[in-house]
Amino acid sequence: MIPEDRILIETDCPYLAPEPHRGTRNDSRNVKYIAEKIAEIRGTSLEEIAKITYENALKIFGIKK
């Protein structure tokens, strides 16, 4: 239900790591698992979600390529 241009991925919850690392401290190495789950839910590829979230981060934070 969330439009593609509104999706970002982050790891701000240090005590709620995604599977397969549940029970350990969360950090940025786990972003991949979040992206994989989003891709699964949306029925698309990990690469597509990576592209979408990368472009969204550039726009939101005003980063020029």
Image (cartoon, rainbow, N blue to C red):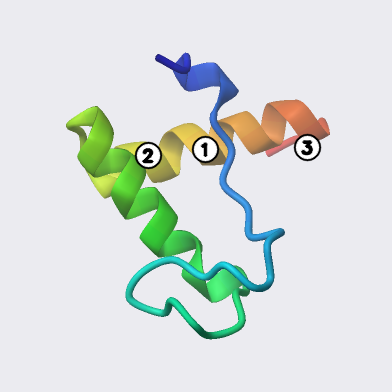
Does residue 38 lie above or below 25 as drawn?
Answer: above
Residue occupying the far right of the picture = 62
Badge 1 marks a residue whose secondary structure is: helix
Q: For mark 2, what is the residue?
A: 49
Does residue 4 lie above or below 54 as drawn?
Answer: above
Badge 3 marks a residue whose secondary structure is: loop
Task: Answer few, some or many: residues within 10 Å of disc 2's Cα (few below 14, many 20 plus, some between 14 and 19).
Answer: many
The amino acid beneath tag 1 is Thr
Marks 3 and 1, how far apart at CA: 13 Å
Q: Residue at x 53, y 85 (%)?
A: 24
Q: Which mark is residue 63?
A: 3
Quadrant assignment for the C terminus:
top right
Marks 2 and 1, how far apart at CA: 6 Å
Q: Which mark is residue 53?
A: 1
Quarter assignment of residue 63: top right
Does residue 47 lie above or below 16 as drawn?
Answer: above
Give the image location of residue 47, x and y in percent: 30, 46
Q: Are marks 2 and 1 in contact (CB under 8 Å)?
A: yes
Badge 2 marks a residue whose secondary structure is: helix
The amino acid beneath tag 2 is Ile
The amino acid beneath tag 3 is Ile
Give the image location of residue 33, x and y in percent: 38, 62
Quarter assignment of residue 58: top right
Q: In screen coordinates, is 20 left or right of 32? A: left
Nearer mark to the viewer, of 3 and 1 = 1
Q: In screen coordinates, is 12 left or right of 24? A: right
